[in-house]
């Protein structure tokens, strides 16, 4: 597949394909109920096709610095294939996986496998949580703003977040935590949502988490630079590659969107869509669901932390520790209960507007 598309047009094809599917979903939502059996059957078929396309398109992309860190992974993979010892200074499980893979497969196959373990857990989690409505969950996760970037650039981070969502879908806490630990062993940043999950088990006051999120904004504005130094001094980001997120130098490997620093009002507004959605469902629509409340609490905690360090270089990587849940925050109640008379149309419009941000920022503004 990747040999047919020049590298400079690779993302153009991807985002316009997503746009086509988003428009199709929106058009269908105007004429049929979301609960209609024929609709669910067509969405199942569309979902399988969509899943296969994303897996193959992402997994068979050319190995290129066009995808930033992908080329770095490829160089490390080549070193392992040539007999370089295992690097134990990074997350061990992913290192063992890469070292083992380098002895039995090509780099191209390795990236296909990475794409599989990035995307497929989201499919499994969507089926577990939403049953026959799984397409809408998987679709909104894939059309999310940072989904493509964390499948082609921040690969370990992306895999870790997908495993975290898969862990959330499990019923038993012992299984959840086993998967969470696996996610952390692939990218240590998953400690943050894991700790947030633990806190949400013991403290369930959503109003408090909302207040904490709101108060994080003036705290960030008033104490610029303080929070970055505070978290560095705690020793929670001792790895040089993570500490570099707060440093003055900027990597040439990251694209122009990631290089913009300062108080990102655009990203804050994007994050606020999840906050407003959760508030509306829980307090206005009186939607009471233990899983959703916990999901919302995790999102608020992780996003509030990002707001505090919003000026840091690569703060988008901290933002992703909440953004990967944003699609679920927005869509979850609409796939569980009837909240609107024309609920399918509401879902279709939400999908379109949600993807519009992805399309404009990643495709139009980035060009």
Image (cartoon, helix red, strand yellow):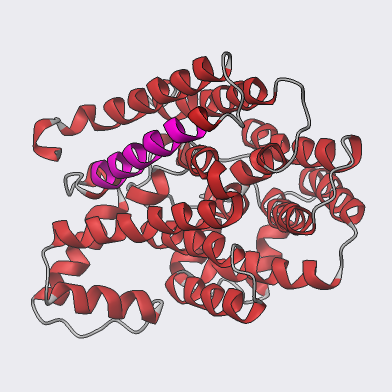
Residue 304 vertical position relative to residue 236 in the rendered view, above or below: above
Is 224 on the left or on the right of 112, as rendered?
Answer: right
261 in magenta: no
Secondary structure mostly seen in magenta is helix
In the figure, is residue 140 to the left or right of 94? right
Measured as percent of width and height from the top left, residue 114 is found at 30, 60
Any magenta on residue 42?
Answer: yes
The stretch in magenta equals: 40-58
Quick one: which residue is furthest to the front in this view? 37
Please state if 342 lies on the left or on the right of 94 as rendered.
right
| Residue 28 as seen in the image, left or right of residue 81 | right
- Given residues 6 and 297, the one toward you in this image is 297
Image quadrant where residue 197 sits: bottom right
Q: Quadrant of the C terminus?
A: top left
Q: Is residue 216 above or below residue 192?
A: above
Up-down relation of residue 302 to residue 323 (above or below)? below
Q: Quadrant of the N terminus?
A: top left
Residue drawn at (51%, 50%) of the image: 314
Whether residue 290 appears in this view of the structure is yes
User: Which residue occupies the foreground of this view, 282 or 307?
Assistant: 282
From the top left corner, tell me how far across and down residue 108 is, in percent.
15, 56
Residue plotted at (11% across, 82% down): 83
Q: Nearer the viewer, residue 310 or 64?
A: 64
Q: Is residue 331 above or below residue 127?
A: above
Q: In percent of the image, x 37 and y 57: which residue is there?
A: 155
Q: How many marks?
A: 0
Image coords of residue 70 (percent x, y): 27, 54
Residue 247 visible? The answer is no
Using the image as rendered, state which of residue 168 and residue 181 is in the foreground. Answer: 168
Q: Position of residue 69 (x, y in %)?
A: 31, 54
């Amino acid at each position: 597949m990747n040999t047919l598309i020049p590298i400079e047009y690779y993302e153009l094809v991807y985002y316009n394909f997503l746009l086509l599917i988003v428009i199709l979903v929106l058009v269908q939502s105007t004429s049929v109920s979301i609960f209609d059996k024929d609709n669910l059957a067509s969405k199942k078929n569309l979902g399988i096709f969509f899943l296969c396309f994303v897996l193959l398109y992402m997994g068979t992309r050319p190995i290129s610095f066009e995808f930033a860190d992908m080329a770095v992974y490829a160089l490390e993979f080549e070193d392992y294939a040539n007999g370089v010892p295992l690097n134990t200074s990074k997350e061990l499980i992913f290192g063992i996986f890469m070292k083992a893979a380098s002895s039995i497969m090509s780099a191209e196959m390795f990236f296909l496998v990475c794409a599989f373990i990035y995307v497929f857990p989201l499919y499994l989690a969507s089926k577990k949580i939403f049953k026959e409505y799984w397409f809408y969950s998987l679709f909104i996760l894939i059309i999310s703003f940072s989904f493509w970037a964390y499948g082609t650039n921040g690969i370990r981070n992306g895999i870790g977040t997908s495993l975290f969502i898969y862990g959330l879908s499990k019923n038993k806490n012992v299984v959840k935590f086993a998967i969470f630990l696996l996610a952390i062993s692939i990218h240590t940043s998953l400690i943050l949502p894991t700790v947030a999950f633990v806190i949400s088990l013991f403290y369930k006051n959503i109003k408090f988490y909302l207040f904490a999120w709101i108060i994080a904004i003036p705290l960030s504005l008033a104490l610029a630079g303080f929070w970055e130094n505070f978290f560095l001094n705690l020793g929670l980001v001792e790895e040089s590659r993570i500490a570099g997120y707060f440093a003055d130098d900027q990597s040439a490997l990251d694209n122009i969107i990631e290089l913009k620093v300062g108080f990102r009002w655009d990203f804050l507004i994007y994050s606020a869509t999840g906050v407003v959605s959760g508030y509306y469902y829980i307090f206005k629509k009186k939607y009471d669901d233990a899983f959703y409340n916990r999901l919302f609490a995790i999102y608020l905690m992780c996003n509030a932390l990002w707001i505090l360090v919003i000026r840091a270089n690569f703060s988008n990587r901290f933002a992703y520790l909440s953004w990967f849940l944003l699609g679920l925050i927005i869509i979850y109640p609409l796939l569980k209960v009837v909240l609107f008379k024309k609920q399918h149309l509401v879902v279709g419009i939400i999908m379109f507007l949600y993807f519009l941000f992805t399309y404009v920022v990643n495709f139009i503004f980035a060009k």
